[in-house]
Image (spheres, rainbow, N blue to C red):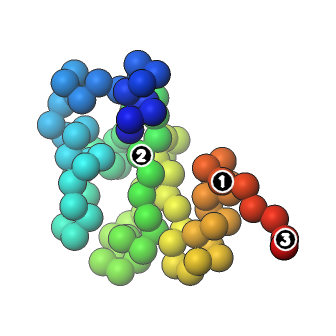
């Protein structure tokens, strides 16, 4: 979020409560309905285990990215696909 702020793509003072809740709220409770209608330019990144453990449907939207955090391997694979990190064989 700080990188988006630095690039002028996100200003918390300009966002509504639903957006801020979707980004910063605890994941111990169901995510706000905004997750299933996310229309921001930047992606909302969620962990798959938050949905699997609670039986929630996984949102399938253009700007919602669900990272597969089931195992260390799937987490790394998801982050590589997202372009957050690079990985290879040692």
Q: CA distance from mark 3 to mark 2?
A: 29 Å
Residue at 34%, 49% (x, y): give it: 36
Q: CA distance from mark 1 to mark 2?
A: 17 Å
Instruction: Count neighbours of disc 2 (C-alpha within 10 A) and say few if under 14, some if 14 to 19, many if 20 or more.
Output: some
Q: Position of residue 62 (x, y in %)?
A: 52, 41
First in sequence: mark 3 or mark 2? 2
Q: Is residue 40 left or right of residue 73?
A: left
Q: Is residue 46 left or right of residue 30?
A: right
Q: Position of residue 33 (x, y in %)?
A: 24, 50
First in sequence: mark 1 or mark 2? 2
Q: Secondary structure at mark 3?
A: loop
Q: Secondary structure at mark 1?
A: loop
Q: Is residue 24 left or right of residue 81?
A: left
Picture quadrant of residue 19: top left
Q: Nearer the viewer, residue 26 or 2?
A: 2
Per the rendering, the mark at residue 85 is 1
Residue 30: in sight, yes or no? no
Q: Position of residue 26 (x, y in %)?
A: 21, 61
Residue at 49%, 58% (x, y): give it: 66
In the image, residue 35 above or below residue 87: above
Q: CA distance from mark 3 to mark 1?
A: 14 Å
Residue at 46%, 41% (x, y): give it: 43
Q: Secondary structure at mark 2?
A: strand
Q: Which residue is mark 3?
A: 89
CB-based contact (under 8 Å), mark 1 and mark 2: no
Q: Is residue 37 left or right of residue 58?
A: left
Q: Which residue is mark 2?
A: 44
Q: Nearer the viewer, residue 71 or 18?
A: 71
Q: Nearer the viewer, residue 41 or 60?
A: 41
Residue at 61%, 58% (x, y): give it: 79
Picture quadrant of residue 17: top left
């Amino acid at each position: 979020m700080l990188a988006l702020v630095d690039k002028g793509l996100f200003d918390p003072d300009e966002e509504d409560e639903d957006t801020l809740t979707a980004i910063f709220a605890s994941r111990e409770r169901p995510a706000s309905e905004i997750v299933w209608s996310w229309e921001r330019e930047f992606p909302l990144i969620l962990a798959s285990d938050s949905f699997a453990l609670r039986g929630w449907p996984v949102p399938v939207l253009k700007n919602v990215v669900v990272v597969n955090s089931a195992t260390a391997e799937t987490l790394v694979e998801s982050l590589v696909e997202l372009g957050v990190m690079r990985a290879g064989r040692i």
